[in-house]
Every structure is written in structure tokens, then in C-alpha cells.
Amino acid sequence: MEHNINEGSYAQYDDWDVFSLKCVEYLMDNDELIWKLLKYNTPDAWDKPNLTMAQKRALIYDGVSDDTSQYHVFMDMGQPDVITAEICQIRIHPYSLTAPNRVVGTIMMMFEVYSNYKINHLTNLRTRNDMIMKRFLQVFNGKNIGGIGRLNLDNLGSYGSRLETGGQLPFKGKWLLMGNRSA
């Protein structure tokens, strides 16, 4: 029987299918502002009371409901339904995996926010989208997220990291790519 000296030296990315969930769970435990900006569509959403865990969970799409407009947190990209409500949504999902070799790869996570134009401006003279992006950076940049590792906005460690503007009427959007080298 031939022995393969390379057996076991390939990155398996075992947690790939739960990366989004790990980030959302981390966000539930480590931020209050984003959840308020998602729940309340009023200009003073930033100044509302913190949400309970049950209220946060109710904002996360469960994969069962046909009406996705009732949810504000998704773990994939794209919007299959037409939404006319004045709401804000976030999407957190794996964006890409590049592997320069069989042992180590760079995992890029995408953090997206989309707010209806009519609710983006807030009474604190900031925008909902910019406040959420700032919080994504503060909550995730440099933090070790279970299964993913230490996410970072650093092109030396994970080429392609960036924050950009996007969206489609009537929603303004921004998206952030943060990565991590993983084995």
C-alpha cells in the first residue's frame, strides 16, 4: 500500500456553510446600534431602546417565509422580492475564496446594507448606511470570529478588502469586504 505524504495537508474550510451565521450571532452579542437602525425606520432610530435577543432573532430571515420584506437580516446576497416598504436591510455572506496553495486560502466576507432613500437620513445628522458601515468596521475589523478567524480590512493580509457604494432605486447601499487567511 502506497503512503501519501500529502494526505491531510489540504485546507477543508469545514465551517464555510456557517460563516454567515457565525457573523450574525457575533453581531447579536456585540452590537446594539445596528439592530436599532434595522428595527426602527424613524429618523431617531439610533436613539431608541436596545432590542432583546428575541427581537433581534425576529429580524433574521428564517428561510421559510415567502414574504422576505418582513425581515431585515439575510445570510446571502440578492433580493428576490420587490420591496416598497421604507426599511433597512443587511446581508452578511461569504463573498469569495482564493487559494494560492492547497493549505491556505483567503476568505472574503461581504457585509452589505441597503436603506430606502426616504429613511436613510437621521436626526443626528448622519446616515443610516454610514452608521451601520462604521459599526461593521468597529465590530468585525480585527476580531476573531469563530470558525472564520480574524477578519480584517487590510489588503496586505487579504487582497480585495474595501468599502464601496451601491444599491438600486429606491434603496441606497454600501458594501464592505473583509477577509482572513485560513487553513
Image (spheres, helix red, strand yellow):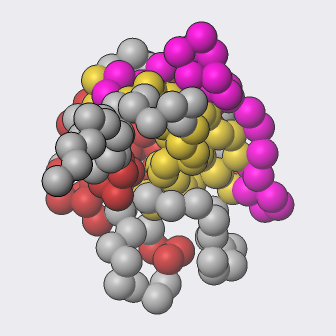
At 76% from the left and 52% from the top, the residue drawn is 167
Q: How many marks?
A: 0
Camera-side residue of 27 and 146: 146
74 shown above or below 126: below
At 73% from the left and 56% from the top, the residue drawn is 171
Q: What is the magenta range?
A: 147-172
Where residue 39 sits: x, y (%)? Answer: 41, 54
Camera-side residue of 169 and 125: 169
Where residue 18 sits: x, y (%)? Answer: 30, 54
Which quadrant, please, contains the C terminus?
A: top left
Q: Is residue 149 visible?
A: yes
Q: Quadrant of residue 56?
A: bottom left
Residue pushed farthest bottom? Answer: 66
Where residue 65 sits: x, y (%)? Answer: 39, 85
Q: Is residue 148 visible?
A: no
Whether 75 is among the magenta residues is no
Residue pushed farthest top? Answer: 156
At 51% from the left and 31% from the top, the residue drawn is 101
At 28% from the left and 23% from the top, the residue drawn is 144
Q: Is residue 168 left or right of residue 123?
A: right
